[in-house]
Amino acid sequence: MLAAVTAHQIAQAGHPAAQAWGCAAKTHGVDAAYQAASELALLAGAAGFTADSRTSITRADLNALLYADGIHDSLYRAAGRDITSLAKTPESDMAIPQVPAMREATTEAPADMHVHPDP
């Protein structure tokens, strides 16, 4: 959930890594949900594997989401490739930009964090 909120804030601030964050957050969320549903089916026993069980239906839906936007491993690679390519450029700033709501809560940024000024 925190990754989704962070991805939203980064996108609203117009950070160049926003697409990579969103891609990675969605991929990780679906992957974690599928793993949890798969473990739940094991805990439920035989009832978790019947065709009409809610657990089985949820697992099938989540499995489809793993492949809906591309195979999830390739999405992880794409997000990693975007993040590392941004880190290699000297003009890029990989620090998470602070949105106005976050700025109100803090008085100053740490010395090692670069905060983008408002446009």
Image (spheres, rainbow, N blue to C red):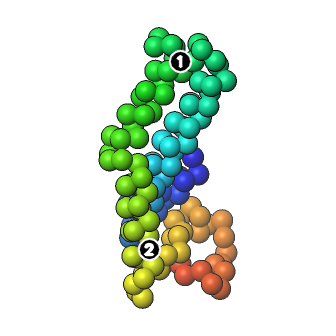
Quick check: 116 above or below 102? below
Q: Position of residue 68 (x, y in %)?
A: 33, 40
- Mark 2 is surrounded, within 10 Å at the Cα level, by few (under 14), some (14 to 19) or many (20 or more) other residues, namely few
Under mark 1, the amino acid is: Phe
In-front residue for pair 73/102: 73
Q: Is residue 22 visible?
A: no
The quadrant the C terminus occupies is bottom left
Q: Position of residue 95 (x, y in %)?
A: 53, 75
Could you say which quadrant of the image residue 55 lies in? Answer: top right
Query: Considering only order in the chain, which callout, 1 or 2, is on the residue closer to the N terminus?
Result: 1
Q: CA distance from mark 2 to mark 1?
A: 41 Å
Q: Secondary structure at mark 1?
A: helix
Residue at the spot x=66%, y=70% of the render?
106
Residue at the spot x=44%, y=70% of the render?
83
Residue at the spot x=58%, y=51% of the render?
2
Q: Is residue 43 visible?
A: yes
- Of the numbered discs in the image, which one, if any, rests on residue 84? 2
Marks 2 and 1 in Cβ contact (< 8 Å): no
Instruction: Count numbered badges in the picture.
Output: 2
In-front residue for pair 53/91: 53
Q: Position of residue 107 (x, y in %)?
A: 67, 75
- Of the numbered discs in the image, which one, if any, rests on residue 117? none
- Mark 1 is surrounded, within 10 Å at the Cα level, by few (under 14), some (14 to 19) or many (20 or more) other residues, namely some
What residue is shown with label 1? 49
Q: Position of residue 105 (x, y in %)?
A: 66, 65
Under mark 2, the amino acid is: Thr
Quick check: 117 above or below 64? below
Q: Secondary structure at mark 2?
A: helix
Quick check: 50 above or below 86? above
